[in-house]
Image (cartoon, rainbow, N blue to C red):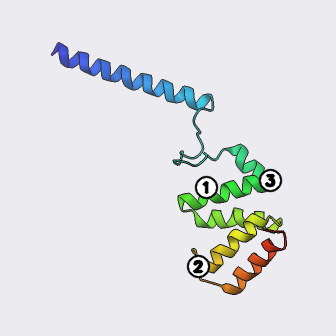
Amino acid sequence: MKKILLVLAVGIVGVIILIAVVLFAVANGIIGSNIGAIPGVTVITAGDRALAESGDVDAQLELAAIYWHVGDIDLAFYWLNRAAEQGNARAEHDFGVVYRDGMFVEKDYEQAVYWFRKAAEQGH
């Protein structure tokens, strides 16, 4: 009986330590707390979203890529479109690929040519 109680006590202490470590990591920015980490992808923070909303094209492209990878195509398209509307050649090219290949949309070669042309006009 004593061995069982000892094992339970050690287990409980271990869980408490794990919770403390996680809370410490979140509080110190070591791990994100907004959206769970995606292997190989940056965690979205409130600061990232604020940058994107303020018009930062790099932040918009980053959010588009993250949302694409997690399968939230509506938000991926939203942020990609925001970057493309600002004349970002990479975003324009990416839209060309989306329409050319029919990625989550029907293939639309007119739209593909439109976006590829806009990107090409900037040397992309």
Count of marks placed on residues? 3
Please rate how many residues cluster around mark 2, counting C-alpha atoms within 10 Å: few if below 14, some from 14 to 19, many from 20: some
**Which disc is residue 66 wearing?**
1
Toward the left, the furthest residue is 1
Quote the CA–CA distance across marks 3 and 2. 27 Å
Secondary structure under badge 1?
helix
Q: Quadrant of the N terminus?
A: top left
The image quadrant that residue 100 belongs to is bottom right
Numbered circle sitting on residue 102 = 2
Estimate the spatial distance between the alpha carbons at disc 1 and disc 2, rounded to whole Å.
20 Å
Residue placed most toward the observer, 118 or 65: 118
* Residue holding disc 3: 56
Closer to the chain start, of discs 1 and 2, is 1
Q: Amino acid at mark 1?
A: Ile
Q: Earlier in the sequence, mark 3 or mark 2?
A: 3
Q: Closer to the camera, 35 or 59?
A: 59
* Residue ID at (71%, 58%): 61
Q: CA distance from mark 3 to mark 1?
A: 16 Å
Q: Are marks 3 and 2 in contact (CB under 8 Å)?
A: no
Asked if the residues shown at circle 3 and circle 1 are in contact, with their CB atoms under 8 angstroms apart, the answer is no
